[in-house]
Amino acid sequence: MSDLTDSLSTHTPMHAIDLIRRKRDRGTLTEAEIRFLVTGAASETIPLEQLAAWLMAAWLNGLAPEEIRALTVAMRDSGVKFSPARLGKVAVDKHSTGGVGDKTSFLVAPLAAACGVVVPMISGRALGHTGGTLDKLEAIPGYRTALTLEEFEAVLVKCGASIVSQTPALVPADRVLYALRDRTGTVESPGLICASILSKKLAAGLDALVLDVKTGSGAFMRKREDAEYLAALMVATAEAAGTRTVALMTDMSQPLGAKAGNWIELVESVELLRGERKAESEDLRELSLILAGWMVYLGGQAETPEAGYERAEAAMADGSGLRMLMEMIAAQGGDVAVFDDPGFHKPGATRLVEAWETGYIAAMDTTMLGWAVQRLGAGREKAGEPVDAHAGIHFHARRGALVEKGQPLATLYATRESMLAEPVALLRQAITFSGNPPEGVPLVSRLFTRGEAEAYLGGSL
Ligand code: URA
């Protein structure tokens, strides 16, 4: 390259419009161009309409492996990086690709912390049809998710676990792009999901990470091969960035546990941590113990994942997991007394839906059920809107259950009476009855370690 061309290419200004048009026309952006977009998102200097257009182009045309890697790293670097080394414990976290009734964070974070690892968890809000860990926690009066780094560290020192949001300092690019994807139909893209999740996890400075990659009717990646690709992509990308990572592919062909919403999901989690067992919550209990077992194992506190499971189960049985969760909530300003107040749950309107046929529940369109939950008031129409802490659905029957016509199927909680009609219609559309029971689906169907992820991708990353 001549001196003139060299100086022209280094000094040519970038324009978001050029990068949108290139992605629209199926081109590939360079690392510097991706960094330009991410920096512009974080500093809010690129207008939201241009970011939204680029996201849609990326959703439609896909991202090349090198673009995904560049996006992940640029988003991680968009803010400060937390350094858990000072905490003197191995830092391990779990992150899910998103589901309905997916509340394992409230169990795994305190259980793993009770077993001796530290869990610095940067989470998200409701995204598309799925619920958000932060929205659920904010159902607790006073709970603060936007902590400073100093506050985050202080909670981790005191409680061993802290669940916080992205902030203008911590992964600010994900803060902006996440909220934008939620409102623009650009969630279900492997590259965008990978960068969103891993930017948060890598910014938290983790030693190890357990990914819960959902598959089935309520997952962003509904098809098995798409979920496998996402799992392999995330494991290989996180490992390349220096974080030991495994991914478990888990079932989302029905809501996890019996409750989906905000406050009601916390209640179901706390019941399990209190040692209360109900058939309707057994899948949630089992998956949480498996995930926590992997966290404890990767954190060096057990010889095997199975031994980690046993340690997590012991922390559930002796109440130390519950204590950890309550300490964390109190340390982040939350009023723990609400967990003992049966009058706290005050939905604006309640409706019981009964089975309209006799038969086996053969299939659930869990994405549609997720939209029903969001439209009861648990999710938002516009970025930044408040959500209803008390909206949600309590499912009284699971996939495979034989139900009689007229038997209670679900209780819906809405912000107000006028918001019930659409979710009731969605629920009726989402559930299919049959004269025969459906085939069972395993809770965990596949594990990806680094070796398996790299073999799956065949050197394409
Ligand atoms: N969780 C995230 O943090 N981001 C996604 O894109 C999906 C799930």
Image: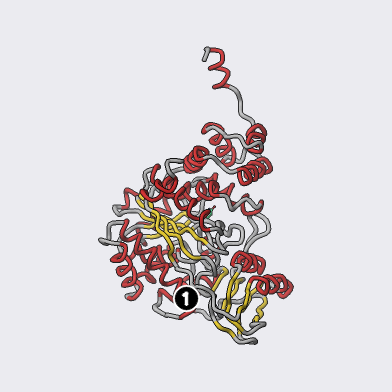
Report the residue that reaches farthest toward the right. 418
Which image quadrant is residue 429 in? Answer: bottom right
Helix, strand or loop at label 1? It is helix
In this rendering, the answer to whether 50 lies above or below 274 is above
Q: Quadrant of the C terminus?
A: top left
Image location (x, y in percent) of residue 213:
47, 58
Does 394 appear above or below 82?
below
Q: Residue at x 37, y 69 (%)?
A: 321
- Please tell me whether residue 193 is drawn above or below residue 352 in the rendered image: above
State the image coordinates of residue 309 (x, y, percent, origin top left). 33, 67
Mark 1 Cα shell of 10 Å, populated few (<14), some (14-19), many (≥20) = some
Residue at image coords 59%, 47%? 176
Residue 94 placement: quadrant: bottom left
Please give the name of the residue rendered at 58% of the width and 72% of the height, measured from the top-left corner.
Answer: 363
Q: Of 7 and 353, which appears nearest the observer?
A: 353
Residue 224 visible (yes or no): yes
Q: Name the one closer to the observer, 424 or 168.
A: 424
Mark 1 CB lies closer than 8 A to ligand 1? no
Residue for badge 1 = 281
- Which residue is nearer to you in this view: 375 or 190? 190
Camera sees residue 142? no
Q: Nearer the viewer, residue 52 or 149?
A: 52
Q: Most extreme residue toward the front, as rendered?
A: 436
